Structures are given as structure tokens and as C-alpha cells.
Amino acid sequence: MGRSQSLSRGGDPRFGPDADDSASPILHVDMDAFYASVEVRHRPELRGLPVVVGGVGPRGVVSSASYEARRFGVRSAMPTARARALCPGAVYLPPDFARYRAASDAVMRIFRDVTPLVEPLSLDEAFLDVAGARRLFGPPAAIARQIRERVTAEQGLTCSVGVGPSKFVAKLGSTRAKPDGLLVVPADRVLEFLHPLPVDALWGVGERSAETLRRLGLRTIGDLAEAPVGMLRKALGAASAAHLHELARGRDARPVSPEHVEKSIGAEVTFDVDVVDPQQIRRALLALSEKVGSRLRGAGQVGRTVSLKVRLSDFRTVNRSRTLGVATDVAREIFDTSWGLWTALDPGEPVRLVGVRVEGLAGAVDTPRQLALGAPERGWREAETAADAAAARFGRSVIGPASLLGRRDARPGENSSRP
């Protein structure tokens, strides 16, 4: 995902499917144009057409574009309006995350049939450590081929796989293999593979950092590997300099961690028109808090830090956060905190986007919370848990905070599904 412009696919036999994989047990599997591909699978009549998934309003952003759409220059994270200008004939679809989650779960089950050491990074990509699977399934490259074949045969989707001695190298390999390819990086050829690549292929190098490095004459990963660490510290700071210098030399000792836990859960909304009315902001924060609370409860997580994100009409982004005394998964408490952050911020300018996020997550069953009988939080949690159950049966659209339906500040126990 994301860097394929910088890492064009190549046919170098040094890194082909038949390269030496004996010391390269890490796989990175990345689904190809995942959201768009799932939509095409759902609607076969779209096959071969440019398909774009994302916000369909005037402020929407592209989440996924089929390779047919990418030929017109459409890319993820691009404003939908720009995508429409580039490819007016594309099919534009709103995202269906329930559908993508179901497809992701099915793909992840295929991975776990091979090894328990699976570390999902998102719905459409994961690391696998297949060192212990050799006896049953063969060497890493053979396992990668089997996974690709099963994903296509069982799910009607394609994926690209990088095979390498480390997570970093495997991820770069899958990017270079796209679409629908396989690339193997032998352990003794890591530097041959890495050093010709541009510096922005490194994890942690964004546009600004890449420009800083280019001003220093560092255009490739090889250039960065040979650069004095002191010069990098001055340009990037001590932590980033050390991290990038290690990666540039092919060093990445991080293991595949199957118990990967989300560090935060959040939601945000981009308004169709810039908003100045505080009550409209309030309603948006309430809806976002309800969504975040529901996701937390569904994941069995609670968190102590509530963060507010505000993007102003000039695209400046402001972030504020507050740490609670007790971890929570209660939407009402998340809303109260985010609204308090908003009123303290009071930017006095038109707002383009707001977001709510809960951070510092921990398992709900292992985390002490305020559960005293009659405590307000207990009442809200019980009401929201009941709403979760009703939403699972009747759909989330008929269940929501009462103030979204014209009744502000309803108390637990009131029927918030009525108008």
C-alpha cells in the first residue's frame, strides 16, 4: 500500500520467486486494491472498469482505487473531487466496512492455516513468520505461492507477497511485487535490494523528511546508509536518525507479533461545507463518540486518553487530548471529554473536519473501571450495551444518541430510538 509509485515492479531474477529463501522466513502479504477489489467481487459487472471507493461527497477522500482507475492517476488519499476530474468515467462507491471486514477475516484465516504467527497491520495486510511451517508446507517462497493461490481460489481476490529476512525488507518486497506478484529477497542480498531504492521507501520518511534528506544530497537508501550519523541527527533528530540509519543498513530485529493490539480507536468526519455552528460540531462529536464507543466495546477494549482532532478551513490541523482517571468505553464519557476539549479550544474559524479518538487501550476485562451501582457511568454503559445488541439485530441506523434525533441530553433508560 501507498509507496508503489516509488517502487516500480521489476523482473530482476536476483529477487524472483526462485531466489534463495533459506534465511528469509518473513512474509508480508498485501491485498491488491483491497476495497475496490471486494466491491468488484460483489458486483462482477464492474470487472475491468475503473472503480473508486471513498467519500462520495464534495469533501470526500479516496480510500481505494482499482488498477484501471490508477491508470488515470487516481490514488488513495486523493480528494474525490480530484479523482473525478482525472477519471470522470469511473464508478464511485461509498465504503462498506462490514463487507471489507468479512473479506479480511476470511483472508486472515487462510494465513492462520499456515502459521499462528500472523500480525495483521490493517484489514488488507499482515506479516507472517513461516519458519516453523517449513516441514508441513515447504520453504517460504512455496508457502507464499500457496497463500496467493488460496486467496484467489477461495476469495476471488489477489495479493502481493514479499519474502525476506525481516519485516521491513518483506514489506518493501510486497510493494515492489505489486500487483499480484511475488518477490523474494535473499538474506545475503538485502543491501543489493535496498540501496538503489529512493529514501522515501523507508518507513518513517514522509515528504518533508525526504526533501530534507535530498537537500543533503541523500537520494537513495544507499546514500543514507553511508551518511555520517551526526549529520542525520542534526537534520532529523537523534531518534529518527538512529532508526533510519539502522533500516538503511538492513537491520530490523522486530519479531512478528501475533498479539498485535490496536493502539487507538477513532472516527472522523469531513463536512460537505465548512462549519461554524457550535451545535453542529456538538452533534458531530456526539455521533463520532457513539461510533468510537461502539467499536471499543466490540473490540473488548477501554482507553484512558480521549483526543480531539480539528481541521480548519485553511487545512491547519489542531489536536488536543485529555487523560481520564479511569479507562472507559462509554460513548457519553468520550463525548463529554471531546466536547470539553472543543469548548476550551474554540478556534473561532470555519471547521472542515473533526475527529474523536481513544488512546492508551487495554483489555476491558483486565482493567478496573467505575462500576458502583447507581454511578452515572454504569447507567450509560448499560444503555449503550443494550443499544449495541439492538443495532446488531436491527441495524445501527435505527439506534443512535437521542440528541441526534432532536432530543438533547437524554438520560439512560429513555428510548433513544424514537424520534
Image (spheres, rainbow, N blue to C red):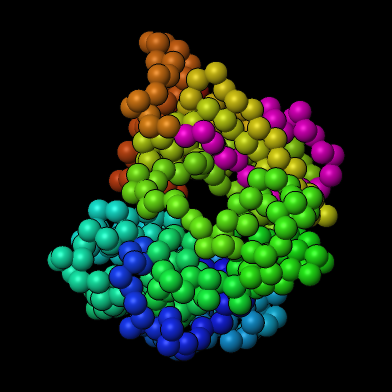
Magenta residue check for 360: yes
Judge from the rendering whether residue 191 lies leftward or rightward of residue 387; answer left or right. Answer: right
Residue found at x 77% / y 55%: 231
Image quadrant in which you'd find residue 109: bottom left
Q: Give the range drawn in magenta.
A: 340-361
Please say whether residue 266 is visible from this viewpoint: yes
Q: Which one is in front, 57 or 203?
A: 203
Please say whether residue 419 is visible from this viewpoint: no
Asked if residue 140 is positioned above or below residue 289 in the image, the reply reads below
Residue found at x 64% / y 28%: 322
Q: Where is residue 220 in the image (x, y as percent from the top left)?
A: 67, 72
Residue found at x 35% / y 44%: 259
Judge from the rendering whether residue 80 lies leftward or rightward of residue 21; answer left or right. Answer: right
Magenta residue check for 16: no
The single residue placed furthest to the top in the displayed view is 373
Judge from the rendering whether residue 356 lies leftward or rightward of residue 372; answer left or right. Answer: right
Q: Where is residue 102 in the image (x, y as percent from the top left)?
A: 33, 60
Asked if residue 245 is positioned above or below residue 408 in the image, the reply reads below
Numbered-mark total = 0
Q: Which one is in front, 86 or 58?
A: 86
Q: Where is residue 111 in the image (x, y as percent from the top left)?
A: 28, 62
